[in-house]
Amino acid sequence: MDCCKSQISKKPLWKRILGNVIGGECHSATGMDTQGLPRIVLVGSPNVGKSALFNRLTGAYVTVSNYPGTTVEIFKGKGRINGQEWAIIDTPGTYSLLPLTEEQRITRALLMEEQTELILHVVDAKNLERMFIFTIELLEAGLPVMLVLNIVDEAEALGLQFDTEKLEQVLGIPVVATAAALGKGIDTLKNKISGYTTGKLACCQRRAG
Ligand SMILES: Nc1nc2c(ncn2[C@@H]2O[C@H](COP(=O)(O)OP(=O)(O)OP(=O)(O)O)[C@@H](O)[C@H]2O)c(=O)[nH]1
Ligand SMILES: [Mg+2]
């Protein structure tokens, strides 16, 4: 982006180096006019269906931009969920909040540096145990998380079953089973998003965003 280029060239060397380590640039990471809208950010390991869910939640108005100073693409869209308009952000596949890779550093910056009302942690329901560690990490960071068990069609075909209510009770956060590619569970997901953000979900305390 031009604004970044001009500012980066004027920055002292230490700031240019540190900027690459700690993230944060001269403008919002995703340059679309969604100012004032509450934000939903989709996070999770590669290939779990984040983008499939993103497409289900957003309309035609989607932009893609490189995260400032990187070649990593961030998709941002607007979505209307039960009458409420949202800014919805799709992130690159990441396994953890630890800033070990560029993708993880950017995801961390997207979550930590801007107000986020809700994080959808998308996992492959077939590999729930392995991916669950990231859910705990997000919760320990005090972030407002909803767990989305996606690709549930394949998991069920393997004989796996999920008691989402029990999981909600144990974790204290909303849990939804979806098959984004098939459009399954999307209405439930939308209702839980509305219920959670308006404080109407009996199961789960809303955490500060
Ligand atoms: N069977 C099944 N396939 C799915 C489902 N959701 C997504 N997929 C497929 O899984 C593959 C990966 O989906 P993406 O939405 O690109 O996954 P992603 O998490 O955005 O992947 P990265 O951007 O690489 O991190 C695609 O082939 C999708 O069609 C689902 O619920 N069921
Ligand atoms: Mg994707």
Image (cartoon, grey):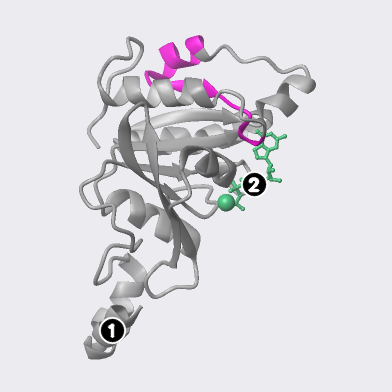
Is residue 81 shown left or right of residue 134?
left
* Residue 88 location (% of width, % of height): 39, 45
Q: What residue does disc 1 label?
A: 8
Does mark 1's beta carbon lie closer than 8 Å to ligand 1?
no
**What is the crowding at mark 1: few (fewer than 14 residues within 10 Å), some, or many (at least 20)?**
some
Q: Position of residue 171 (x, y in %)?
A: 42, 19
Q: Which sits in the foreground, 29 or 125? A: 29
Asked which secondary structure carries label 1, the reply is helix
Query: Residue at horizontal 25%, vertical 22%?
Result: 198
Is 58 above or below relative to 151? below
Question: Residue, x 44% and y 15% (percent of image)?
Answer: 168
Figure quarter occupied by ligand 1:
top right
Q: Is residue 2 above or below residue 137?
A: below
Residue 51 within the segment the image draws in magenta:
no
Q: Are marks 1 and 2 in contact (CB under 8 Å)?
A: no
For the residue marked with disc 1, what is the amino acid? Answer: Ile
Is residue 167 shown in magenta?
yes
Q: Does residue 159 appear to the left or right of 9 in the view shown? A: right
| Residue 138 in which image quadrant | top left
Residue 167 placed where, x, y %?
A: 49, 15
Q: Residue at x 43, y 32 (%)?
A: 136
Q: CA distance from mark 1 to mark 2?
A: 33 Å
Q: Is mark 2 within 8 Å of ligand 1?
A: yes
* x and y percentages locating residue 84 in the rendered image: 30, 32
Tell me the kind of residue under disc 2.
Asn
Q: Front-most of 55 and 39?
A: 55
Q: Which mark is residue 47?
A: 2
Residue 58 in the image: above or below residue 113: above
- The span picked out in magenta is 165-181
